[in-house]
Image (spheres, grey):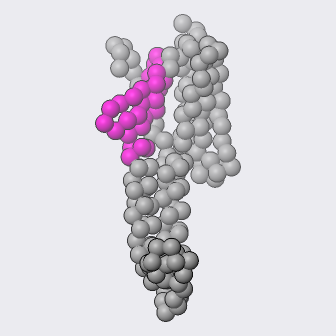
């Protein structure tokens, strides 16, 4: 932070909106389905004869069912860990001069938006966001060639938007 700069608000995005989190939960669901199929079809043996014709290896689909949930759970664990780490190491910070989107595990990257450069701020909420109580803030810059900046997965998005609007209005008065 610069001299005389104070933090007004600091937020972390929600893990629920992360695609890797949703993927991890989906893999856990598939794991449960394959586990139940493995219990129901324990003695049934369905052979892949077309694979054995080309490879010389003959295996049964349901012989490998106990292994499938384990593999899916390992993939799910990796996806959930990735989602958690990406949220844990990301901060949205509003100071009295600027907005900072800081992220990174080993190295920190920061997108810094000066308050006097923001021309428009809006809230974008999908149906799933509304159910989860989340939203994303879209910041548009005065310069035409600058891209929109999206702050995603914010809880209580209206109060965060109000903090940014106060910062912008204070900056415009001075």
Nearest the viewer among 85 and 3 is: 85
The reply to whether residue 65 is in sight is: no
| On-image quarter of the N terminus | top left
Residue lying at the far bottom in this picture: please name it: 43
Relative to 146, residue 81 above or below:
below
Please tell me which residue is depicted at 66% across the width and 42% down the height of the picture.
125
**Residue 99 sits above or below residue 71 on the image:** above
Q: How many marks?
A: 0
68 or 163, which is in the foreground? 68
> What residue sits 55% from the left and 25% below the top?
164
Q: Residue at x 59, y 18 (%)?
A: 146
Viewer-proximal residue, 15 or 161? 15
Q: Position of residue 67 (x, y in %)?
A: 41, 75
Residue 84 x/y as whole percent: 41, 49
Image: magenta residue range: 85-112
Q: Quadrant of residue 149?
A: top right
Residue 136 drawn at (x, y percent): 59, 37
Residue farthest to the top?
Answer: 174
**Left or right: 30 with respect to 126?**
left
Q: Is residue 143 above or below residue 123?
A: above
Q: Is residue 17 within the magenta segment?
A: no
106 part of magenta stretch: yes
Find residue 29 and report its horizontal and vertical position in percent.
53, 68
Asked where in the image residue 106 lies, by quadrant, the reply is: top left
Left of 134 or right of it: where is 103?
left
Quadrant in which the C terminus is drawn: top right
């Amino acid at each position: 932070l610069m001299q005389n700069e104070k933090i007004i608000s600091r937020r972390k995005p929600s893990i629920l909106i992360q695609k890797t989190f949703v993927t991890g939960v989906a893999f856990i669901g598939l794991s449960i389905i394959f586990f139940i199929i493995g219990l129901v079809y324990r003695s049934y043996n369905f052979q892949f004869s077309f694979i054995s014709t080309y490879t010389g290896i003959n295996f049964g689909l349901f012989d490998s069912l106990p292994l499938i949930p384990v593999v899916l759970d390992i993939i799910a664990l990796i996806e959930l860990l990735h989602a958690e780490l990406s949220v844990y190491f990301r901060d949205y910070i509003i100071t009295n001069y600027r907005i900072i989107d800081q992220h990174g595990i080993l190295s920190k990257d920061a997108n810094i938006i000066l308050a006097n450069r923001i021309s428009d701020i809006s809230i974008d909420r999908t149906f799933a966001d509304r159910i989860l109580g989340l939203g994303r803030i879209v910041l548009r810059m005065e310069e035409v060639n600058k891209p929109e900046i999206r702050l995603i997965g914010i809880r209580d998005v209206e109060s965060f938007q109000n903090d940014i609007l106060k910062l912008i209005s204070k900056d415009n008065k001075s």
